[in-house]
Image: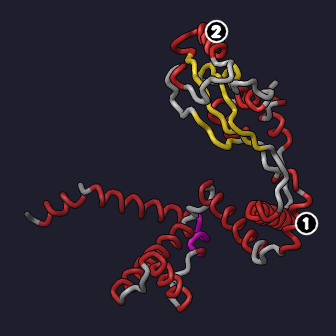
Amino acid sequence: MNGRGRLARLIREPLVHFLALGAALFALYALINPGATDRRTTRIDVGPDELAWITTTWSQQYRRPPSDAELRSLVDEYVHDEVLYREALAMGLDRDDIIVKRRLVQKLGFLTEDVATQQPPTERELEQYFAANRERYRLPPRLTFTHIYFSTDQRGAAARPDAERVLARLSHAGAPARAPELGDRFMLQYDFAERAPDEIAQLFGGAFAESLFALPPPQASGWQGPLNSGFGVHLVRVVARTPGRMPELAEVVTAVRQDLDLERRNEANARRYATLRGRYTVQVDSAAFHRLSAGGNR
């Protein structure tokens, strides 16, 4: 193939088109924004701090230090990313990018939170926080129960009358303590141990959980109902009740420490933002605001 043919073939390559377009865009951007390239620094120093970070990151992942060849490859990768990062900054690709903006906001928040939680709370601080927020840590009541299920999908309106007839059969002292076979097949289990109201509500619905915990002391057989759930109709037998109570700090100290840390981070972020916000003057276009708001569209 002669030189002219090779040149024609090269011109038709998509990669060449891509590179040419990229170069044209970069040149156009530099022409329109002559000061943009000033953001790029052409010197890349890979010093002790950078090398320590590279080797530490590698060692944490592979449980050993990198070899000479691996470290050279890691340095090449670091330089590769740094070159492209600086070129992207020089072209202003970080501007008006909501993902980049949110990531930077998140990182600044992490820095503030790290400073706020450098000192772990003392025992006295945990006690004071627990005393001021005791109700938050109240342990809920819990029930252990079994049930018989009557499907409204299968029985329709007859599900409740059928449950009432079965309850009448179970209303004597010698009734079985567990009788799922008297109802329909249930997609979940029939026996539940030490469940709190919110746990039961997640499975059966809030109305069922409220009705279950409101049941009076049972009669001789222990079977009660019928109760409605999101699945259908149920007869229930409460096996054990654990009343709600206020715990000691030692029982919930992990949750208290986490909540106190979170409160400190939130307060630190709020203080940091208030300081930074004071440096800025914000002007909102009131006409556009009212035009675009829900009130302005009435």
> Real-space Cα distance between discs 2 and 1?
55 Å
Q: Is residue 138 found left or right of 55 in the rendered image?
A: right
Quadrant holding the N terminus: bottom left
Of the two numbered discs 2 and 1 in the rendering, the one whose residue sits closer to the viewer: 2
| Residue 40, placed above or below residue 95 | below
Residue 175 numbered mark, or none: none
Quadrant holding the C terminus: top right
Quadrant of residue 231 in the image? top right
Q: Report which residue position mark 2 lands on.
A: 161
| SS at mark 1 in the image | helix
Q: Earlier in the sequence, mark 2 or mark 1?
A: 1
Residue 70 seen from this side: yes
| Magenta-highlighted residues | 33-38
What residue is drawn where x is 36% and y is 83%?
70
Quadrant of residue 209 in the image? top right
What residue is drawn where x is 59% and y is 62%?
94
Q: Position of residue 171 (x, y in %)?
A: 68, 18
Q: Amino acid at mark 1?
A: Gln
Q: Report which residue position mark 1 lands on.
A: 128
Dot 1: within a 10 Å radius of its alpha carbon, few (fewer than 14), some, or many (20 or more) residues?
Answer: few
What residue is drawn where x is 79% and y is 65%?
250
Quadrant of residue 17 in the image? bottom left
Q: Is residue 23 found left or right of 139 in the rendered image?
A: left
| SS at mark 2 in the image | helix
The front one of 26 and 250 is 250
Q: Is residue 71 found left or right of 284 in the rendered image?
A: left
What residue is drawn where x is 30% and y is 60%?
16
Q: Residue furthest left?
A: 1
